[in-house]
Image (cartoon, helix red, strand yellow):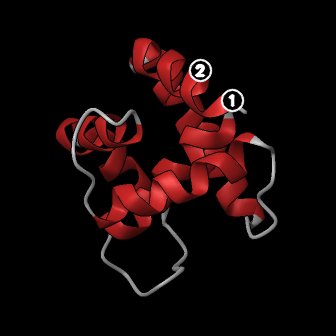
Amino acid sequence: MQTTLVLLLVVAACAYAAEAPRPQVTDTALEDALNDKRFIQRQLKCALGEAPCDPIGKRLKTLAPLVLRGACPQCSPQETKQIQRTLSYVQRNYPQQWAKIVRQYAG
């Protein structure tokens, strides 16, 4: 359940880095995405249905129910590590939005 937003943000970091489909996300690209507050807030609002979604947000919303159910068969060990890092970041820096997302997608 907790890895939902993390996986979503890792996917967003992939798109943010503008690499080929299903690229390896470098730690630098993930850090850049996490440090871009406007980007993070835009994706959080999309996930919560509070704002329109860009293509990244649409992909995130598609993955959310899968990740909340603990299903991420396509995640590599590196993605799992990055998911944990992102989870920690979002919980620390966006606790209210995190709580809303968990409530919204847990059901």
Q: Secondary structure at mark 2?
A: helix
Residue 11, image x, y percentages = 49, 61
Q: Secondary structure at mark 1?
A: loop
Q: Is the Cβ of the residue at disc 1 closer than 8 Å to that at disc 2?
A: yes
Above or below residue 61? Residue 104 is above
Q: Is residue 29 in view from this perspective?
A: no
Residue farthest along the left direction in this orientation: 38
The residue pinned by badge 2 equals: 103
**Neighbour tally class for label 1: few under 14, some 14-19, many 20 plus, Cα within 10 Å:** few
Residue 49 relative to residue 21: left or right? left
Residue 5, image x, y percentages = 54, 40
Residue 90 relative to residue 17: left or right? right
User: Residue, x 55% and y 27% (percent of image)?
Assistant: 104
Residue 5 relative to residue 84: left or right? left
Cα distance in 3D space between marks 1 and 2? 7 Å
> Closer to the camera, 77 or 3?
3
User: Residue, x 31% and y 66% (percent of image)?
Assistant: 55
The residue pinned by badge 1 equals: 107
